Image (cartoon, rainbow, N blue to C red):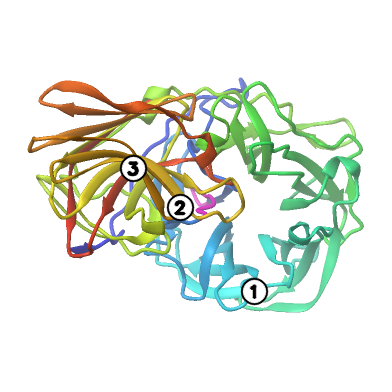
Amino acid sequence: MTRFLLSAIICFSFFLRSVYAQQPGLLNPVLAGDRPDPTLIKVGEFYYASATSNEWAPLFPIFQSKDMINWEVVNYVFPEGAPAWAKNNFWAPELSYDEKQGKLYAYYTARDKNTNRLSVAVASADSPIGKFRDHGPLVAQELGSIDAFETRDEHGKLFLLWKEDGNSRGQKTPIWAQEINEDRTQLIGDKTKLFENDQPWEGGLVEGVAIFRKNGYFYATYSARGCCEIDCDYVTGVARSKALLGPWEKFGQNPIQVDNASWKCPGHGTVIEEDGEFFLLYHAYNTEGSVFVGRQGVLEKMHWTEDLWPILPDEAAYDRKLSSLDFEDDFSKGLDPIWQWRVTQKINYSTDEKGLYLQASEENEELGTLLVQGTKSLDYRYEVTVIPDPQAEAGLALIGGANNGFGAPVAGIGVSVKGNRLVLWESIDRKRREISSKEIQDEAIGLILEIKDGYRLQAKTLIDGKMELIGSEQDVRHLVPWGMGFRLGLVAKGSPESTAHFRSVKISY
């Protein structure tokens, strides 16, 4: 077995077309699939973006683009899993480049193993494609500290902004600012409250602040209400101030961004300037894909009122051709970097011209070893060819949560083969039930999961060119996880001494 390492430059491209006549070349979603809390900066001639990873490693992808048309993943902040101090909730990366130092800083949120507090931490690298060094937590308040953003005040002093996660205890959610040293290793002096949720439209929280400057003002875009549940109502607001530490004035016509025909619950974005125009990269659920796909990265141009307030006209549509999201892999060139695994597990595998050999386990709530991808549409077909083994159960599964509550353990439904037995199963809270089973005899078995409307699942098998249904159609809405779309991919269940053999994978949207 070889330990999963990401040492090569990772390439996969997103081709973009514009919604706006003023900015040809943009295509939404910019980041398809579950890419919440996106961040976007420009370093030299390249743009760089990242997004929340939640509980799926590798953590915090670094996307690169020269023109905001062609994108590729060139790095991860933590390619081999979590830093030693953190256990889960890997959220809201925020990239910042220090031109004088020639360093890239990646702020992020994670939960501390010892204190169980949500903490704002930072890592740094000499370049966006370099190896990141983790510097650990900067602030971890009792109620939790999340959603970091770095900016300089009107005097050039460096400040860190973040949200105190008071809504987790039914309290207000202040946005704090505090000076930070130039090495980004320590906060300095006292923190200052910029604003909090104090208007009816904001609901129980404000969060996800991003700062930019224009017209002699600091502008702060921010999000309010509920981001991530089935009944989400996330919206975007804006405030402004002549000085970073205030006083801050909120726009009288907030929210500046709400649902439109294509996207719902928009929020937590980053503003970038391009040729004098300002664009907001934010996340939103596609109105058709909903929570089953997750929050996708959407890029939209900002417009301005006569009294110098930025607004978003909600013009962003869904323009991407679904066929561009199709994926095939026979593992002959190794493991494609698009694959994900649980951050709590170390993946062991090998590949050759005959396919992928994935070490089995009883981890992940006894589901086994998971190697998955985010889903990108409501309707798709997922196929895998497995070579049956009497020791390891090799399967294809849709992975979600045991319930829709925050922090729910993983659960799933799938079809697997072990020896000459094929089983359609569901596993929740380590309790597995067999839905259907049959005896098979073949050297290579095709397993298929077809998804319709995001939650209607039909398992099939292909043996000797003959297609057969496995059980009846299953409604999997109860498995949709809080804050994440479904993952779907490979499962290897059994003793760690055994290996599941997968010959090829194909995903058709």
Lower sequence index among marks 1 and 2: 2
Q: State whether residue 45 is above or below residue 377.
A: below
At x 47%, y 45%, the residue is 400
Q: Does the CB distance between marks 2 and 3 fall below 8 Å?
A: no
- The nearer-to-camera label among 2 and 3 is 3
Lower sequence index among marks 3 and 1: 1
Residue where numbered disc 2 is placed: 62
- The nearer-to-camera label among 1 and 2 is 1
Amino acid at pointer 1: Leu
**Label 2, label 3: how far apart the Cα atoms are:** 23 Å
Residue where numbered disc 3 is placed: 489
At x 75%, y 72%, the residue is 179
At x 83%, y 44%, the residue is 202
Amino acid at pointer 2: Ile
Where residue 138 is drawn, which disc sits there? 1
Q: In the image, is residue 52 part of the stretch drawn in magenta?
A: yes
Quarter in which the C terminus is drawn: top left
Q: Does the CB distance between marks 1 and 2 fall below 8 Å?
A: no
User: Could one spot residue 371 in this view of the protein?
Assistant: yes
What count of labels does the image hold?
Answer: 3
Q: State whether residue 100 is above or below residue 368.
A: below
Q: In the image, is residue 173 part of the stretch drawn in magenta?
A: no
Q: Does the CB distance between marks 3 and 1 fall below 8 Å?
A: no
- Residue 302 position, x and y percent, is 71, 33
Boundaries of the magenta span: 43-54
The residue nearer to you, when weighing 20 against 505, is: 505
